[in-house]
Every structure is written in C-alpha cells, then in structure tokens.
C-alpha cells in the first residue's frame, strides 16, 4: 500500500528536483 505509493512519489520528486536544478 504505502510502499506502492512511495514508488510512484519518489520518481516525481526526482523529476521536480532535476527541473529545479536546470532552471
């Protein structure tokens, strides 16, 4: 349950951080 949600949330955070660094 929660681990499944984390598996989806973590990649979203990585993309967010990468986009922030590019800007």
Image: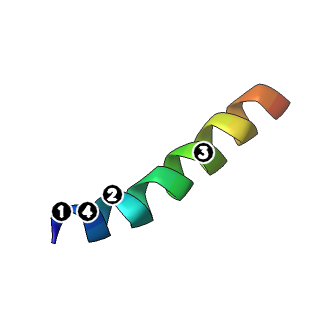
Circles 4 and 1: CB atoms closer than 8 Å: yes
In this rendering, the answer to whether 2 lies above or below 20 is below
Secondary structure beneath disc 3? Answer: helix
Q: Residue at x 40, y 57 (%)?
A: 9
- How far, Cα to Cα, is label 2 from label 4? 5 Å
Q: Residue at x 55, y 56 (%)?
A: 11
- How far, Cα to Cα, is label 3 from label 2? 12 Å
Q: Which residue is mark 3?
A: 14
- How far, Cα to Cα, is label 1 from label 2? 6 Å
Q: Position of residue 12 (x, y in %)?
A: 52, 55
Location of residue 19 (image quadrant): top right
Circles 2 and 4: CB atoms closer than 8 Å: yes
Secondary structure beneath disc 4? Answer: helix
Residue found farthest to the right: 22
Tell me which numbered mark, 3 or 2, is placed earlier along the sequence: 2
Q: Residue at x 18, y 62 (%)?
A: 2
Q: Which mark is residue 2?
A: 1
Q: Position of residue 8 (x, y in %)?
A: 42, 66
Residue 23 seen from this side: no
Q: Which residue is mark 4?
A: 3
Circles 3 and 2: CB atoms closer than 8 Å: no
In this rendering, the answer to whether 18 lies above or below 1 is above
In this picture, residue 20 sits left or right of residue 7: right
Secondary structure beneath disc 1? Answer: helix
């Amino acid at each position: 349950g929660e681990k499944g949600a984390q598996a989806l949330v973590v990649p979203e955070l990585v993309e967010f951080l990468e986009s922030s660094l590019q800007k």
